[in-house]
Amino acid sequence: MSEKYFTRRQFLQFGGGVLSLFTLFKFFNDFSKKVKISFQSSFLPISFKKTFPKKWKKQEINFAEFKSEKYNNKILDSDFTLINDGWIDIINFENYQNINFLSLLDKLDQRSENFLNTFDEDKRNKLFPIGVIPYAVLIKNNKDLINSAHQSWDFLLSKKLTGKIIFPQSPRIIMSIANTIGVKNSIGKLKSQAMMFEDKNSLNWLINSEDSLAIVPYSLCYKYPKIDSRITIVFPKKGVPLMWNFILTKSKKNKEILIEWINSLEKNRTIDKLSNQGWYLPFKNDYSQSKFKQPIKSNIFSLGPSKECWENSWSLHPINSQRKINYEKLWNESLIP
């Protein structure tokens, strides 16, 4: 019986192959264990998405198609879910853990705490406010309206804007604005001013129309005055609607990872980048709070809402099924003059 011996080169080649297989196995094993975060990127500025650690697996979803098996499975398979307050009702909170145990609530400012307290206890314990986006008014080719727009929302009833306003698709946003206008049947009067009710393509319509106005989240439109000099961004001093964004967690085992990421958001440079793109951290540290205290700017390159605007701005509180029915009835019965 003959014996076979490894030469030194053969031994090294064999060892290298085993090492390669081990490395490959380890890579796929680590990849499968990556922390996963699901989110809808529509309203997220680039600067915020860049804060996600590179090791995380990012899963983009469309909450409008939440009931489809494809997107539902993505959310169920995610460690963290990022969602705005407009979609809270579709979430099954039984799938999520309390986030209070992370002692993260100490970071939140009074505005965040007040909004959290509008939710019932089970939801409140599982929602962590990670960002707030103010709605903005974009005025195109109607610069004579800018001064009145800075003061209040009453300017929306101007005859110059009849049939030229692009409203959000959300009736609650429009009704909340109507509540700040002190005229009878303000909802119906606003509806009569509409060019359309649109979210996804509102900015395209604005750019491609002659004289118009759009109400959109600031994170979507902050750069447009620099692109088109005919467009001006305005934040009425009477306040604007706010869009809240929350993080939810499926497992306690990733709490340190979550805390590390949230802590990284509080760097001054990161806070600057986020606020410049319409995303404000609702944290009580001094630098975050400085972004809510901007002076009023009347030029086209707005720095965001002024301190007075922030103080008068409002959040859309959660509603139960009966109140939802009442809102729908009010919306449908509002008459167009």
Image (spheres, rainbow, N blue to C red):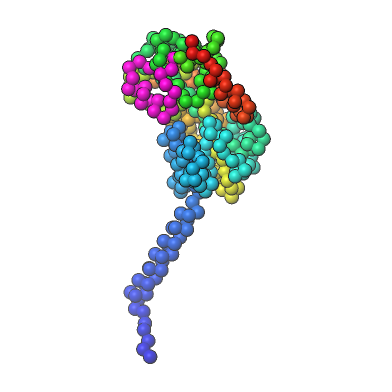
Asked if 97 appears above or below 167 in the picture, the reply is: below
Residue 248 position by quadrant? top right
Q: Residue at x 41, y 61 (%)?
A: 24
Image quarter of the N terminus:
bottom left
Q: Residue at x 63, y 36 (%)?
A: 123
Left or right of 283? Residue 213 is left
> Considering depth in this image, is 173 or 107 the residue closer to the camera?
173
In the rendered image, the residue lying farthest to the bottom is: 1
Q: How many numbered circles does the render carry?
A: 0
Counting from the top left corner in percent of width and height, residue 308 is at: 53, 17
Asked if 303 appears above or below 182 in the picture, the reply is: below
Left or right of 14? Residue 281 is right
> Considering depth in this image, is 274 or 209 the residue closer to the camera?
209
Q: Which residues are magenta?
A: 193-215
Q: Is residue 20 magenta?
A: no
Counting from the top left corner in percent of width and height, residue 188 is at: 51, 14
Residue 23 position by quadrant? bottom left
Q: Residue at x 65, y 37 (%)?
A: 122
Counting from the top left corner in percent of width and height, residue 191 is at: 47, 16
Q: Is residue 308 shown to the viewer in this render?
A: no
Counting from the top left corner in percent of width and height, residue 282 is at: 55, 30
> Considering depth in this image, is 306 or 251 the residue closer to the camera?
251
Asked if 241 appears above or below 81 in the picture, the reply is: above
Q: Residue at x 36, y 19 (%)?
A: 231
In the rendered image, the residue lying farthest to the right is: 121
Q: Is residue 200 magenta?
A: yes
> Considering depth in this image, is 240 or 12 the residue closer to the camera?
240
Asked if 249 appears above or below 7 in the picture, the reply is: above
Q: Is residue 330 shown to the viewer in this render?
A: yes
